[in-house]
């Protein structure tokens, strides 16, 4: 295929996912929803949209097919911060039982930053935006960190499971936990990754 730059092959990760999972009309949908006159979608919503469509495509390979809303529910179970590890593990196991490469699917999930770069770089789309206030900026920053945490956990879990399957390790069911600690180098005060970070300062600044 020819990408928007006139070159052969996918333009970026979004293009690669769209090609691999045959997500027809994805670019048009992303463009229309991002610059719509009313009810515009943010890049986080658009990233969720791409990832749900990816899951829908994977579920269609199951001879039993997929129920309406099933992809959205699995996506929530795999990515939502409020979902317990037990529920997430159960969801992954159910998908594996259906012959779906869960680790491979999760590694294909895209971030909102990737969607933004695809829209502005690959598709050349732009729209007016207003400056974010402090609370929104912190919330967006924390969401980025949490997305990286989840991705690191997914990649590490897949690596350990592969080592186990190949006989290099002998482990049972495992959970890989990635923790991020924000700490002042001077006073050593630590902050939790929560929205209470808005307006916070360490002992050095009080």
Image (cartoon, rainbow, N blue to C red):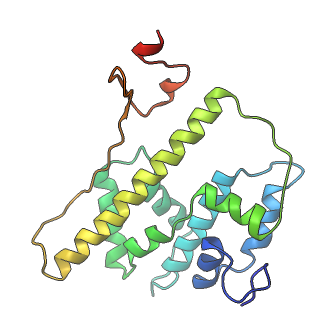
Residue at (51% x, 75% y) in the render? 66
The correct choice, above or below, for 199 with respect to 6 in the image is: above
Task: Describe residue 117's horizontal placement relative to residue 34 as left or right.
Answer: left
Task: Describe residue 158's horizontal placement relative to residue 72 as left or right.
Answer: left
Farthest-out residue, front: 186
Q: Position of residue 72 (x, y in %)?
A: 54, 61
The correct choice, above or below, for 162 with respect to 120 in the image is: below
Q: Quadrant of residue 203?
A: top left
Between 32 and 145, which is closer to the camera in this rendering?
Answer: 145
Between 15 and 121, which is closer to the camera in this rendering?
Answer: 121
Q: Position of residue 27 (x, y in %)?
A: 75, 72
Q: Quadrant of residue 165?
A: bottom left
The correct choice, above or below, for 139 with respect to 98 in the image is: above
Q: Position of residue 13 (x, y in %)?
A: 60, 72
Q: Quadrant of residue 138?
A: top right
Residue at (62% x, 55% y) in the render? 112
Farthest-out residue, top: 206
Q: Position of residue 148 (x, y in %)?
A: 45, 53
Task: Describe residue 12's horizontal placement relative to residue 175 as left or right.
Answer: right
Which quadrant does the N terminus fall into? Answer: bottom right
Residue at (50% x, 79% y) in the render? 58
Farthest-out residue, right: 37
Residue at (81% x, 48% y) in the render? 39
How many numbered discs sit on the rendered protein? 0
């Amino acid at each position: 295929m020819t990408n928007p730059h006139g070159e052969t092959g996918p333009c970026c990760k979004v293009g690669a996912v769209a090609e691999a999972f045959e997500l027809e009309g994805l670019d048009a949908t992303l463009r229309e929803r991002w610059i719509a006159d009313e009810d515009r979608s943010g890049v986080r919503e658009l990233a969720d949209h791409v990832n749900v469509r990816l899951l829908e495509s994977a579920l269609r390979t199951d001879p039993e097919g997929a129920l309406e809303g099933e992809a959205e529910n699995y996506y929530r179970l795999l990515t939502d911060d409020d979902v317990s590890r037990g529920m997430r593990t159960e969801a992954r196991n159910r998908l594996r039982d259906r012959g779906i490469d869960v680790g491979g699917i999760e590694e294909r999930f895209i971030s909102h930053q990737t969607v933004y770069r695809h829209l502005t770089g690959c598709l050349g789309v732009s729209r007016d935006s207003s400056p974010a206030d402090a609370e929104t900026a912190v919330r967006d920053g924390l969401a980025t960190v949490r997305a990286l945490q989840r991705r690191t956990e997914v990649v590490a879990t897949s690596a350990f499971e592969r080592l186990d399957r190949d006989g290099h390790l002998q482990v049972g069911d495992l959970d890989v936990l990635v923790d991020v600690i924000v700490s002042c180098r001077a006073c050593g005060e630590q902050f939790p990754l929560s929205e209470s970070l808005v307006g916070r300062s360490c002992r050095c600044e009080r």
